Amino acid sequence: MLKVPEKEIYPPYYQEGMPGYVLRDWKVVDYKCYKLANTELWFRGPEQDIPTNGEYFSVIGAAQTFGCFCKETYVDMLSAQLQLPGVNFGYPGAGPSFFLKQPEILSRVNSGSFCVVQVMSGRSIGNSLIDNPHGIGYGNRRSDGKLVRTESVFEDQLAEAHERLPAFWNRPPFRRLTKFIPIPRVRRLMAESRQQWVRDYEALLGQIRVPTVLVWFSERSPAYVPRYDSRKSLFGPFPQMVNQPMLTQVKRAADYFVDATTDRGLPQPLVDRFTGETAMIDLSDDNPLYTGRFTENTYYPSPEMHEDAAAALATQCIKLLPQR
């Protein structure tokens, strides 16, 4: 049997514990990740000295704040526009409960001038079928303890419900109507996750003592109607599962709100920065629970979307600048 050669590891400074994006996206962008002092967490760099006088702002969020496939993030752009250092605490797959468990991050957030809080996904929340102790996009299935993506427990429920439908529902023209049939068990599961998401956000915003700017950074509006034919149509685009009623509740706990809805620049062609050719991205380089390959970014915000988010945030954040 032929021995498959091990995949060459890049970048040269890669260390265990760094986000999988570092390996997955190396051909496209160098994230210059660093480990935050007094934690085991890696964030997008380069690392900077945080001013001791509190004249900086912080941003907490998920992969969109981290800035996948973008040389500059909206955090960098906002920092330049405000002429104020900005600390990017974007963490892959994070939900609100992730940051509730990070006292070191909250301490740094509360030592700054203000904090931008991204509206993160609802799929980073646990429920009666999956335990998600870390507040990220996967956890342990309660029935057998297996580590799975959060989406999988919803996909299983949808598949079981569709199997129980009368046979004629799986024939044209009825098949396309199945997306309009509410599935009680799935609706209850969604309700559990959504309620916990709101509670976690209220708790997180309550832990932040500096002014907070909640930002909706997505290609879609908060209003969407879940469908029941697939997990994708059930969750909707990022931030998955989050709808207008959830956002309305959470906005009450924040000091300010900014709508940065934009899809400018999508899809984003991915270019190998070493050869100038099309880059092929393998999702399994990020996490073995994910599969698939692509040459265009259709999921994460594009560089143009980051520009739009920075512009939208600057209008509000300039009012929060410390007196110099």
Image (cartoon, rainbow, N blue to C red):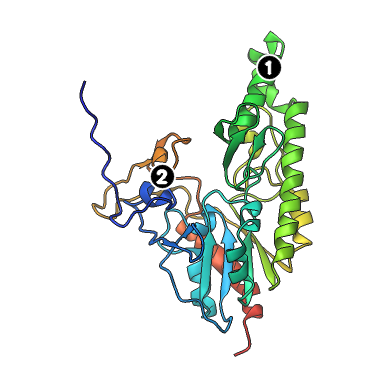
Reading the image, the residue beneath label 1 is 174
Depth check: give the residue in front, 322 or 273.
322
Residue 46: % across, % down: 40, 67
Taking 127 as reference, is 216 above or below it? below
What mark, if any, has residue 296 been given in the picture? 2
The residue type indicated by label 2 comes to Glu
Task: Evaluate whether residue 65 shows in this view.
Answer: yes
Badge 1, how many Cα within 10 Å: few under 14, some, many 20+? few
Which image quarter holds the N terminus?
A: top left
Q: Which residue: 66% across, 44% down?
A: 125
The residue type indicated by label 1 comes to Phe
Taking 322 as reference, is 285 above or below it? above
Callout 2: SS: strand
Which image quarter holds the C terminus?
A: bottom right
Badge 2, how many Cα within 10 Å: few under 14, some, many 20+? some
Q: In this image, 304 relative to 214: left or right? A: left
Question: What whole-number distance in Å separates the C-alpha atoms at marks 1 and 2?
Answer: 34 Å
Task: Evaluate whether residue 216 shows in this view.
Answer: no
